[in-house]
Image (cartoon, rainbow, N blue to C red):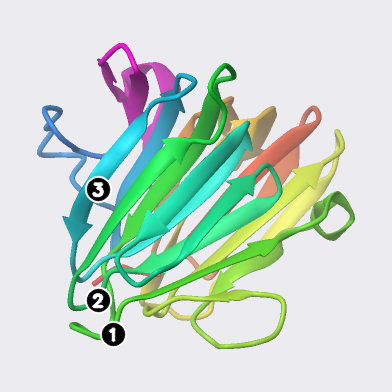
Amino acid sequence: MNTVIHKSELRGHANHGWLDTHHTFSFGMYHDPSRVHFGMLRVLNDDFVIGGAGFGKHGHDNMEIISIPLQGSLAHSDSTGNEGIISTGDIQIMSAGSGIQHAEYNASETELVNFLQLWIFPKERNISPRYDQLTFTKEQLRNRLYNIVSATEKEGTLWINQDAELYLGEFDELIQISHALKSANHGIYVFVIEGSVTIGDITLNKRDGIGIYDADSVLATVHEQSKILLIEVPMK
């Protein structure tokens, strides 16, 4: 098993006033040649946007973009006519495909919104742009890794244009978590949203991340109430 550890305090950071953001991987003005991506996972940003502000209309192509609100609400609109608001418990996915224009704004004029933004390289290029969102309950996430995004189209899970799987869980203390990788060519990236877990002899705290590859499975122990995102992606 090989690992790469990303401690929270060593992430890239930028504060634009309206946006306070931390970058696990190189993004914008932050560039670290040792932290460009983990397999097909290209971006993992931890964004805080003040009330009434947001990302104006801009374009993307050939990228799978996933948004996970952790606090507050995020308003979305795009050039395919999709509009919506997502809050804690909702997950949003957008396949930029052959090209899409979109905007993301804090849905509140006064309250902060905090959300994770992930970019994953697509399996097939130039597909038709698409958008989807789903709501996941605390009961679904309690003490298990729940499959929120999948490479397979199935009810109750968002579909992604890549051989990738995303899992989210909210755990009580002293719970053990195990995950078997789908393929020997895959790796997993574990991001601790809240709490503290140990994988092997490595302890991860709030907003720490670890990439694991050349492994068949992973076992983690939760030390306190924790919220964990697990991302399984092809390594190449």
Secondary structure type for disc 2: loop
Secondary structure type for disc 3: strand
N-terminal label among 3 and 2: 3
Mark 3: amino acid: Lys
Q: Residue at x 56, y 69 (%)?
A: 149
Mark 2: amino acid: Gly
Examine the rendering and report whether any part of residue 223 can be seen: yes
Secondary structure type for disc 1: loop
Q: Quick check: 13 above or below 63?
A: above
Residue 97: which numbered mark, if any? 2
Q: Nearer the viewer, residue 20 or 227?
A: 20
Q: Residue at x 64, y 75 (%)?
A: 157
Q: Residue 107: percent from the left, percent from the top?
A: 54, 35
Q: Residue 124: percent from the left, percent from the top?
A: 25, 86
N-terminal label among 3 and 1: 3
Q: Quadrant of residue 1?
A: bottom left
- What segment carries the magenta color? 1-24
The 10 Å Cα crowd at callout 2, few under 14, some 14 to 19, many 20 or more, is: many
Report the number of discs.
3
Q: Residue at x 28, y 69 (%)?
A: 96
Q: Nearer the viewer, residue 137 or 176?
A: 137
Q: Residue 4: percent from the left, percent from the top?
A: 35, 42
**CB of mark 1 within 8 Å of CB of mark 2?**
yes
The residue where tag 3 is placed is 57
Q: Nearer the viewer, residue 203 or 207?
A: 207
**Left or right of residue 177: residue 152:** left
Q: Residue 212: percent from the left, percent from the top?
A: 43, 54
Mark 1: amino acid: Ser
Residue 128: which numbered mark, if any? 1
